[in-house]
Image (spheres, grey):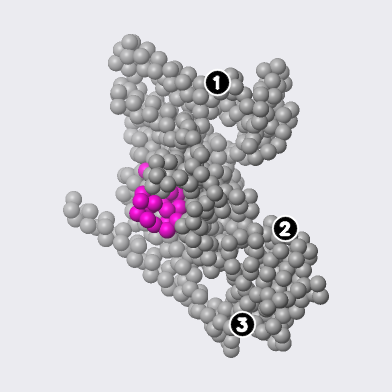
Amino acid sequence: MGRIDKRIIKRFFLCFLCSSCIAVIMSLGMALFDYLQVKDNRGKYAISDENIYCNKKLVKEQGKYKISKKNDEIVIKFLKKTYINKLQYRYLVAESIDKNCKIKVYMDNIYGDETVKKIEDNYFKGMSRSVVNIKGNVTKIVFKFPTMNSEMELYDFVIDNRFKWNPYLFVIINTFIFVILFVILFRKEGAEHPGAITFICINVIAICMLILQTPYCSGWDEEIHFSRCYNMAITFDSEEGAPSVIDYLVDNYAWLDLHHEMSIEERIDMIRNMNYLGEIRGAELDTYIIQINSIGYVFQVIAITIGRFLGLPFYCVWTMGRLANVFLYSIGMSLAISIIPIGKRLLMLISLAPTMIFLSTTYTYDVSVIVFLILGSCIWIKEIVSEDTVFSYRSRALYILCMIVGCMPKAVYIPMILGAFFLPSKKFYSSKDKYIFKGIIVLCLCLLMSTFILPTLTNPTVGGDVRGGDTSVSRQLEYVLHKPLAYGVVLLNNIRKKWISYTTGGALGYIIYFGKCISDEIYTILLVGVAITDTYSEKQGKTKYTFKSKIISAIMISVTIVLIWTALYLSFTEVGQTKIAGVQGRYYLPFIFLIYLWFRNEKIENRFSIYRYQLFVVLISCIMVMCQIADSFFAKCCI
């Protein structure tokens, strides 16, 4: 056993060493290639004022160009073609500019013919410089400023042609190669312990995605979730109030959500700015009241508290909170894969989906909902397909705990706890034991539903969506109660229109502002194909996943979907509208695994070796998510 352990450790370090060496060589090689493109103007030097032209209305004072709120234009001309790797300039702005500056770079293309490269540049409040990646022989650069909400100043235009190594390129190459080598070299162990192989793959890929993300809020409503987590972490602090960086992230969330493209230098500046603001006391006080849904923040709050206790810079504390979600997700999904006796490869494929991993790298309670509901569902399926074994007290306690914790942040998922209610009598020690357990299930259902329904019925708020619009829970509730048939038609039409997009590959490959899956169709085919062909547990003598079980899961999911759409209709849809607003594909993630289990057919026999089959599934999953990372994060945010 000791020899086997040593071999496993050696193979693991071999993967890491090989991937690191290749990543170093490739990243340095690309940096050297860019550097060798520079012939006679290597280094960093300022652009002379003689090369800078501006329109008459643009004012220049003390070497700074005053950009007004009106359309202004600055032109940089060169007497001969000049190679520029990076163009850097300084700016001063009172608040983040709500529109991008349009930059036209007149440069040679790969054939040596002059072409125009169009670039959009962003200006962040609290930042001081912009670094634009050009990489070409340039004759002219034109800055076209839109009508802006604030005046600004530009100065110190500099050409930077120094040797530039891209650490983010190293990270993505290293991760890609490591995951591929790891999955291949550990294919036997992976087939025997699929949960363990999934745990490592999720952590490696998620950490890569976390590093490549922009250093501020980028997830769904992340500024809200982060503010709550941080305020929970400082609740028992003797000093009230949060740092100024919280104000910065919350006040600028609408702008930051839409501006994720930045150079490496700008990312470093943003991290420094966040660390600086993290040392200054802000205006926001600890006004967040701990609620029932706060349980979804526990792990993130613990990580933030530890980071603050250690006195780490704000960016490190921020990252630790996100990592807490990553570890919760990886541990939870690996346990679920280990528990469930059927569909292991299907659950591995879903757990490695881009949307799922991206959510785990952001501040949100969705991860807690997804992880615990999938864990509870896997326990239920295990009991369904193992009819000859009794539902042990330990398994019952774990099932109820998972379902309660998963539903507390979002009570609309509580119908999913009813799966255990339909277990047959032979799963219990006695009739009394059965009725007690099912009574507990009903009690949990009623208590959790009361947190969702009673506040709405007894004291419906006048307003709905705090972000604005003609929303009102009380007025919307009148439509539902007075015209239930009409609302039923509205509900079914909305569910029907979004059913395909919310349950296919696009729902698992969509990463909010960064873009959608490279190929929704391929992902969908892969999901259905794996759902149909992953029948290895049946060969090991497991009881079949019956049609009755599929009907039970379909009923639970249907009721849950109705509650999701109804909750969003009451709170986020303008009064009287027939199109329900606010519902997103990520709300289907806690039960999307159960949906694809419907395709399972025991009549189809898979004769492939389990080692080869799982290798194919995991390898394709990792390649697809890494391609998505390269396209959505590296290509847009880390050049």
Q: CA distance from mark 1 to mark 2?
A: 45 Å
Give the magenta-colored segment's residue range.
306-331
Q: Which mark is residue 46?
A: 3
Secondary structure, mark 3, is strand
Instruction: Tell me which secondary structure the magenta stretch mostly adopts.
Output: helix
Q: Which mark is residue 192?
A: none
Q: Is residue 1 visible?
A: yes
Q: Quadrant of residue 151?
A: bottom right
Please report the residue visible at 35 percent of the width from the left and 62 percent of the height from the top. Answer: 16
Residue nearer the viewer, 564 or 66? 66
Q: Residue 30: x percent and y percent? A: 50, 74
Q: CA distance from mark 2 to mark 3?
A: 29 Å
Q: Earlier in the sequence, mark 3 or mark 1?
A: 3
Please report the residue visible at 27 percent of the width from the left and 60 percent of the height from the top. Answer: 10
In which quadrant is the C terminus drawn? bottom right
Q: Which mark is residue 149?
A: 2
Q: Quadrant of residue 157?
A: bottom right
Q: Are the residues flagged by discs 1 and 2 in contact, CB closer than 8 Å? A: no
Secondary structure, mark 2, is loop
Q: Are the residues flagged by discs 3 and 1 in contact, CB closer than 8 Å? A: no
Mark 1 or 2, which is nearer the eye? 2
Farthest residue, direction bottom: 40
Q: Is residue 549 visible?
A: no
Farthest residue, direction top: 432
Residue nearer the viewer, 186 or 579? 579
Q: Residue 578: x percent and y percent? A: 73, 30
Q: Which residue is mark 1?
A: 454
Secondary structure, mark 1, is helix
Drawn side of residue 15 relative to residue 623, left or right:
left
Amino acid on which disc 1 is placed: Leu
The answer to whether residue 255 is above or below residue 554 is below
